[in-house]
Amino acid sequence: MIDRREAIRRVSALLGGAALIGGSSLIAACDRERRVTYSGVGAFTADDVALLDEIAETMLPETATPGAKAAAVGPFMALMVTDSYKEEDQRIFMAGVQQLNAASQQANGATFMSATPAARLALLESLDREQKAYQDAK
């Protein structure tokens, strides 16, 4: 099981450090208690953004500190993909999200959004181990 620090390190590496842009603004945003409803970003529907939020919240859950949802990580990911990825890479990202849902359906008999928090975490840990094994084999 990965801890919060490791998850942040991996997300930062994945985004090429983009999560650190804005310095203390990101941290301040995490501390504010607010709920914002997003209607969608670019090609991402509100359901897509909600799914990204749930994936991020599974990795960075709310504890004594706010979690990924409170930091609006789902809308941030959607914005980054929409504004920074080439069109082909956007399609690959969206296909990956659909594959995650398919993997959840196969493993849990439910979509990622409908799965229990424990089932969500187990799925993401399984995919993380698979990715690590693939990278180690390269």
Image: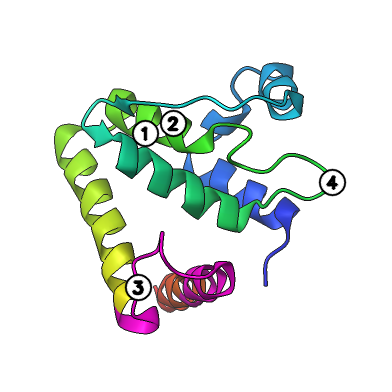
Mark toward the start of the polypeptide (3 vs 4): 4
Q: Residue 138 magenta-drawn?
A: no
Occupied quadrant, residue 98: bottom left
Write the start and end of the magenta stretch as one range: 106-126
Cα gap from disc 1 to disc 4, whole angstroms? 26 Å
- Quarter of the figure with the N terminus: bottom right
Q: Which residue is mark 4?
A: 64
134 versus 52 height, above or below: below
- Quarter of the figure with the C terminus: bottom left
Q: Residue at x 40, y 26 (%)?
A: 38
Query: Outermost residue, right direction?
Result: 64
Say what secondary structure mark 1 lies in: helix
The disc at residue 110 is 3
Of badges 3 and 1, the one in the foreground is: 3
The disc at residue 75 is 2
Say what secondary structure mark 4 lies in: loop
Which amino acid is tagged 2? Answer: Pro
Cα gap from disc 3 to disc 1, whole angstroms? 23 Å
Can residue 16 be seen in the rendering of this structure? Answer: no
